[in-house]
Image (tube, rainbow, N blue to C red):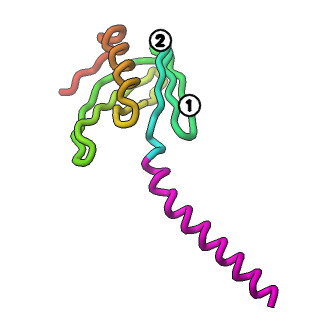
Amino acid sequence: MHTHSLSNDILTLILITIALLILMIPAFLFFRKSTDMQIEGDVLTLRYPFSKDIIRLATDLKSWNLQEAFLLRIGKVYAIQLNLKNGKVKSISSRFNAKDFQKVLQHLEEKYGERKKTER
């Protein structure tokens, strides 16, 4: 009888773990693109939930552009697309951190306006 109770406890634990994982997947997918950004001088640090990128704008930035989107639930959202000299593209959004996004945009406009690509 003790073995039967142990197997029920293990089965219950497995089911609870699966339920929690199912609930966490949408949150992970939503927040994996969120970016904490910080700019100090010409160094832009992007922190994602599972990684960190350091971009030295003076040497790494090839071009950049500002994109605008209107999302039904959120409203107007802006994104900066950074095209780097190594071929990588980084995108940062105003959705999660509008204050720091504005600082980065202002810095790019002031120091790297000539590298801004315009939409055609």
Instruction: Note whether 5 is above or below 64 in the view shown.
Output: below
Q: Does the stretch in magenta take in 33?
A: no
Residue 65 is situated, as x and y percent measured from the top left of the image, at 30, 24
Residue placed furthest toward the bottom: 1
The kind of secondary structure element at disc 2 is loop
Q: Residue at x 42, y 30 (%)?
A: 89
Instruction: Note whether 92 is above or below 39 in the view shown.
Output: below
Indicate which disc residue 42 carries.
2
Work out whether mark 2 precedes mark 1 in sequence or the reverse, and give the earlier one. Answer: 2
Residue placed furthest toward the left: 120
Question: 48 or 55, which is in the foreground?
Answer: 48
Query: Which quadrant of the figure contains the N terminus?
Result: bottom right
Q: Which image quarter: residue 10? A: bottom right
Q: Amino acid at mark 2?
A: Asp
Question: 86 or 93, which is in the foreground?
Answer: 93
Q: Label 1 crowding class (10 Å Cα cut-off): few <14, some 14-19, many 20+?
A: few
Indicate which disc residue 66 carries.
none
Q: Does the stretch in magenta take in 23?
A: yes
Instruction: Note whether 105 is above or below 81 in the view shown.
Output: above
Q: Residue at x 76, y 87 (%)?
A: 4
Q: Which image quarter: residue 104? A: top left
Part of the protein shown in magenta: 1-30
Query: Which quadrant of the figure contains the C terminus?
Result: top left
Indicate which disc residue 52 carries.
1
**Exactly how many numbered labels are in the figure?**
2
Compared across the picture, whether 29 is left or right of 98 comes to right
Residue 88 is situated, as x and y percent measured from the top left of the image, at 46, 29
The kind of secondary structure element at disc 1 is strand
Q: Amino acid at mark 1?
A: Lys
Q: Residue at x 44, y 23 (%)?
A: 84
Residue 56 is situated, as x and y percent measured from the top left of the image, at 50, 16
